[in-house]
Image: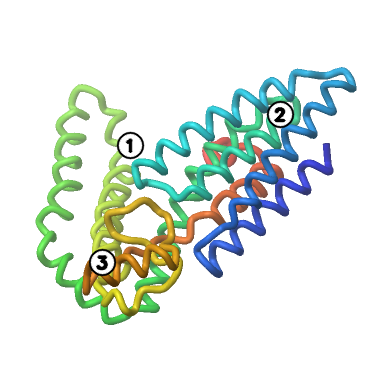
Amino acid sequence: MLEILIIAVAGSILAGLWDLKTTEVPDQLPIGMVIVGIAYWILQGFLGNWYPFTVSIIVGTTLLVIGLIMYKKGQWGAADAWILAAIGYMIPVYGGEIFIVPYLMNFMLVSIFYTIAYSVIIGLLNRPVLKYVAKDFRENLKFIIGVPAAVLIVILAASAAAPRMIDLIPKLVPLIFLLLVFWRYAFVIEKRVFRRKILTSKLRKGDVLEDGNWVGLTEKDIKKLKKQKRYVVIKDGMRFVPVFAIALVLTLLFGNLFFIILG
């Protein structure tokens, strides 16, 4: 099984690096990973064990359908959908257990930290936008402080009947405050950095329109837009594909990180 693990890790890392460099992951890469995964487990089936192949087909196809639905709704790029499915097809079981369960839990955890780190770096690279962040914080200060304060009051009131709820205060209240701060920060970054109004004459192949799915414009699309409009709004976004590789490596090395954190 080592060979399929190496191919899965190498493929996901390559996709992540491609995404960071160009924002476009060639379709051939994740589709190739899917084909390799299915072919590998068919071979293992002929050698006497069809269980991994069955799990591979069920998990991989389910993930692909969910991913493509998210893509159609504009929430994900096509590469995200295919890379996640590819991992499901390539590693159906690991250590005697269905692999996708700890992987998805780790994926959510890695996503949170990756999103925070990525947004902070983007803000630092675009320092003029920080004045808008400060302005947004001032305008929403009552909300940012008020929600944690309300939660604190609710916990104190409830602790009269359930004293142990008081233990939630040092964990829950600061967490809610930090999430609200990051939410407003990310909102400004999204609005001021990841959305730009530009002349159609400055459009480049691979740019993505604000109201469209995460599909880059082709030369044909650009020529058509130049005839129809003078300005368009294009969107950029987080280079998210590296999360799949990071979560994969961590899951293979350490298992379910939630058990380690809570453990």
Question: Residue 77 at x, y = what percent?
Answer: 45, 50
Residue displayed at 27% across by 54% down: 211
Sooner in the amino-acid sequence: mark 3 or mark 2: 2
Q: Disc 3 designates what residue?
A: 233
Residue displayed at 65% across by 25% down: 57
Q: Do the residues labelled 1 and 3 touch (CB within 8 Å)?
A: no
Mark closer to the observer (1, 2): 2
Q: Local crowd at mark 1 within 10 Å, few (<14), some, or many (≥20)?
A: few
Q: Residue type at mark 3? A: Val
Q: Residue type at mark 2? A: Val
Question: Residue 24 at x, y = what percent?
Answer: 52, 61
Mark closer to the observer (1, 3): 3
Left or right? Give the position of 101 relative to 97. left
* Circle 3 SS class: strand
Q: Disc 1 designates what residue?
A: 167
Mark closer to the observer (3, 2): 3
The image quarter in which residue 1 lies: top right
Judge by depth and name the residue closer to the eye, 27 or 134: 27
213 above or below 68?
below
